[in-house]
Image (cartoon, rainbow, N blue to C red):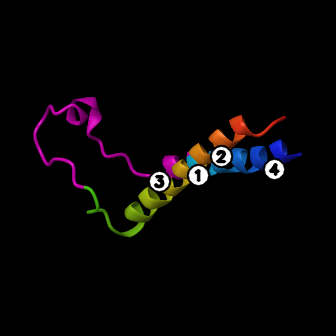
Amino acid sequence: MLFWLVLIPFVLVSLLLTLVILMQEPKQAGLGEGLGGGGGGGIDFGTRGGTAGGLQRVTIYLGVTWGVLALLLQAVPR
């Protein structure tokens, strides 16, 4: 019974996390920018305001919640 009480929120958070990630606008930087190649600005944490900043914050919260629920699924007996 306890397994299902953890599994159902886990599935719901997984779906929400997927939806929130797909709603975000891409940075258009590509792999080269992430590895230090290319010019332009560096990493600027905390400078995104408005909807983009809110989605980023929700993504972090959902990701942490997803990780905790994944660990709980391993600890809860079936």
Foreground label between 2 and 3: 2
Q: Compare marks 2 and 4 and give the one earlier in the sequence.
A: 4
* Label 3, residues with CA under 10 Å away: few <14, some 14-19, many ≥20: few
Q: Position of residue 43 (x, y in %)?
A: 21, 48
Q: Which mark is residue 60?
A: 3
Residue at left offset 25%, top offset 35%? 34
Marks 3 and 2: in contact by CB < 8 Å?
no
- Calculate the distance from the C-alpha at mark 4 to the C-alpha at mark 3: 23 Å
Quadrant including the C terminus: top right
Q: Compare marks 3 and 1 and give the one earlier in the sequence.
A: 3
Q: Which mark is residue 5?
A: 4
Tell me where the magenta segment starts and ends, as one range. 18-44
Q: Position of residue 42 (x, y in %)?
A: 16, 47
Give the amino acid at mark 3: Ile
Marks 2 and 1: in contact by CB < 8 Å?
yes
Magenta segment: does it hold 58? no
Give the amino acid at mark 4: Leu
Magenta segment: does it hold 31? yes
- Calculate the distance from the C-alpha at mark 4 to the C-alpha at mark 1: 14 Å
Residue at left offset 38%, top offset 63%? 53
- Calculate the distance from the C-alpha at mark 2 to the C-alpha at mark 4: 10 Å
Q: Which mark is residue 39?
A: none
Q: Compare marks 2 and 3 and give the one earlier in the sequence.
A: 3
- Calculate the distance from the C-alpha at mark 2 to the C-alpha at mark 3: 14 Å
- Calculate the distance from the C-alpha at mark 3 to the C-alpha at mark 1: 9 Å
Q: Which residue is mark 2?
A: 69
Q: Which residue is mark 1?
A: 65
Query: Viewed as shown, does residue 73 lie left or right of 1?
Result: left
Name the residue nearer the viewer: 6 or 12. 6
Residue at left offset 65%, top offset 50%? 13
* Label 4, residues with CA under 10 Å away: few <14, some 14-19, many ≥20: few
Label 4 SS: helix
